[in-house]
Image (spheres, rainbow, N blue to C red):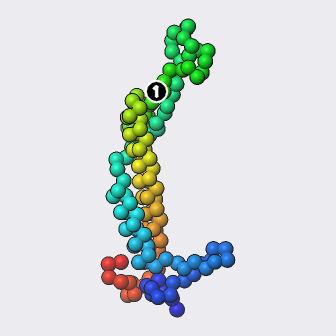
Amino acid sequence: MYTYGDQSTPPRRTTGENLVPEPTLADLQARYHGLAAKISRIGFTATGTLLRSHNVCGSAGCACHTDPGRRHGPYWQYTRKINGKTVTRRLTNAQAAQYADWISNGRALRDLLAQMQQVSDQARDMILATPQEDRQPGT
């Protein structure tokens, strides 16, 4: 009979018509360390929203009031919550490009952390299903 500690014959699960082998603990450890390596390559991060707007001015005779294509801008704003309060900051085009990268990095980081948690959940279930005496050292 197969136990999770036995790395030679992993059980199979079905996905449609194909049989897919269950990952081994070594597979999960390799996946986890691969995700950790990706995290180490992520640059600075930010959370929040980047907004681009074109505005109408206060001059009644300005063309921005009658032609939406001639509105002023673009203007960039970065908004996030700090201690429960919304904080908004105006940005230049160059700053907006940096914030776009940082926000993208933040999303990538959160995605990688979620994947690491899923791998950890699988590994934990696998380890705990293995009888104590059959576990390898370090697990």
Residue 9 vertical placement versus 15 (above, below): below
Q: Quadrant of the C terminus?
A: bottom left
Q: Position of residue 85 (x, y in %)?
A: 41, 33
Most extreme residue toward the right, as rendered? 17
- Camera-side residue: 32 or 53? 53
Does residue 51 appear anywhere in the picture?
yes
In the figure, residue 36 lies in which quadrant?
A: bottom left
What residue do we see at 46% from left, 36% from top?
Answer: 50
Q: Give amino acid for label 1.
A: Tyr
Please state the horizontal and vertical placement of residue 123, each as a whole percent of the image. 44, 73
Q: Is residue 135 above or below residue 115?
A: below
20 sits to left or right of 51: right
Give residue 137's position: percent from left, percent from top.
32, 82
Which residue is drawn at the image coordinates 47% and 74% (left, top)? 125
Residue linked to disc 1: 75
Helix, strand or loop at label 1? It is strand
Question: Residue at the spot x=36%, y=63% of the render?
Answer: 37
Residue in the picture at 44% in, 47% down: 104
Q: Is residue 111 above or below residue 127?
A: above
Of all residues shown, which one is farthest toward the bottom?
1
Badge 1: residue crowd in 10 Å (few <14, some 14–19, many ≥20): some
